[in-house]
Amino acid sequence: MLRNEILDNSLYQEMTSLIEPMGFKVVDVIRNETAGGVLMYLTVFSPEREVTTDDLAAVYNIVYPRYQVLLNTRDLTLEVSSPGLQRNFKDYYEFTLFTGKMVRIYSERFSSNLEGRIKECKDGTVTLTDVIIQDTNEKMDELALAFEDIQKAKLTYRWEEKK
């Protein structure tokens, strides 16, 4: 089930203020404390272009030293990654991040997977265009889904499409 809580997460807010000036958005950030130190996982996205390994290294080089000092530990493990082609959504916030991208949603209203392009996300509703209901192969130009109708969602990619 999707959550609606990342925007209130203090670690998310810190990371956003740190990397947004670099042109990246925080998709997800997780911090786990273990007996061996602190593990942090940061997923970043650029709405302007594809994220490269050089971009991930640049983000790492900004975030790692800062959190090593803030957490007062030498035992910090930081993993910085991009969302990938088929990211499973964890938070409703991700619909606003990935506007314009293809998504697959399991809808309780249709009891089926839907595939379409995110047009907009506002007021607890996601609007998709070029929608295909996978069980019936029915096509729609546009469909609005309330957050309550969405069981799960993930980025998808139509391999046959050309840009």
Image: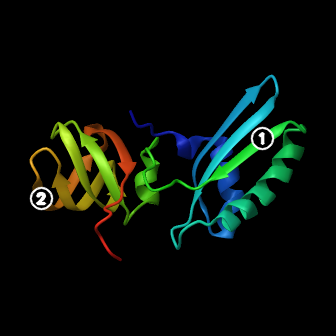
The residue carrying pointer 1 sits among few (fewer than 14), some (14 to 19) or many (20 or more) residues within 10 Å by Cα, namely: some
Left or right, 1 with respect to 55, comes to left
Rendered location of residue 82, percent (x, y): 57, 56
Q: Earlier in the sequence, mark 1 or mark 2?
A: 1
Left or right, 75 with respect to 6, comes to right
Name which residue lies at 70% across and 50% down.
Answer: 14
Position above or below: 34 against 91: above
Q: Amino acid at mark 1?
A: Thr
Check the image and tell me how it is coloured: rainbow
Which part of the image, by quadrant, shows the N terminus? top left
Q: Which residue is mark 1?
A: 77
For residue 128, which quarter of the picture? Answer: bottom left
Left or right, 28 with respect to 55, comes to left
Q: Which residue is mark 2?
A: 139
Name which residue lies at 31% across and 43% down.
Answer: 147
The residue carrying pointer 2 sits among few (fewer than 14), some (14 to 19) or many (20 or more) residues within 10 Å by Cα, namely: some
Left or right, 134 with respect to 45, comes to left
Q: Amino acid at mark 2?
A: Lys
